[in-house]
Amino acid sequence: MIEDTLLEAEEKMDKAVEVAKEDFASIRTGRANPGLFAKVLVEYYGSPTPLQQLASFAVPEARTLLITPFDRTSLNDIERALSNSDVGANPSNDGNVIRVVMPELTQERRREYVKIVRSKGEDAKISIRNIRRRAKDELDKIVKDGDAGEDEGARAEKELDALTKAHTDNVDELLKRKETELLEV
């Protein structure tokens, strides 16, 4: 039972780190990247649909992104969703593709992005600590019910702490890399 609890906690912590990676990828740097639009939802036939499911992406230049919709009738909906997104891009529609030219980042805007990244990193670490707390409660319950000895419970708690530290360190490393990437001119 202890192993199951630890395994479940590790899987959830891995997912929290993956979510942090995805969040960091959706924050733009100077280069155009399809990952910037991962969280953009397009109103398509009445339901919000992720942009990746409606179009293909190409990066012909460092700051230009071409979005080619699979269904030409969704062109205006995609353009509207991009305009309303918080990516900070100005899409232009030529009837076949949407061309998105990413503006140069100012130093002030870079600092704002760093604040956003730090906030998302802290959210990920809070999530990991919450997972640890729930797993520790579960371990304490197992020991209290007599399903495992106190020594086993203490050993499992040390393992849980090591898992938590490894995952928070992983988030910190991702955060440091993204901050460097954002501040690089």
Image (cartoon, rainbow, N blue to C red):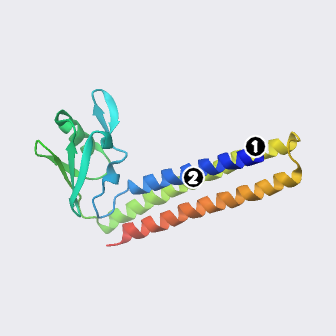
Quadrant position of the C terminus in the picture: bottom left
Write the residue at 75% across / 43% down: 138
The residue to which callout 2 is attached is: 14
Q: How far apart are marks 1 and 2 (CA)?
A: 19 Å
Quadrant position of the N terminus in the picture: top right
Looking at the image, is mark 1 or mark 2 earlier in the sequence? 2
User: Callout 1: few (<14), some (14-19), or many (20+) C-alpha neighbours within 10 Å?
Assistant: some
Reply above or below: 145 against 37: above
Q: Which mark is residue 67?
A: none
**What x and y, as percent, mark residue 8?**
66, 45
Reply above or below: 32 against 53: below
The residue to which callout 1 is attached is: 138
Q: Is mark 1 on a helix, strand or loop?
A: helix
Reply above or below: 69 against 156: above
The quadrant holding residue 81 is top left
**What x and y, as percent, mark residue 105?**
28, 64
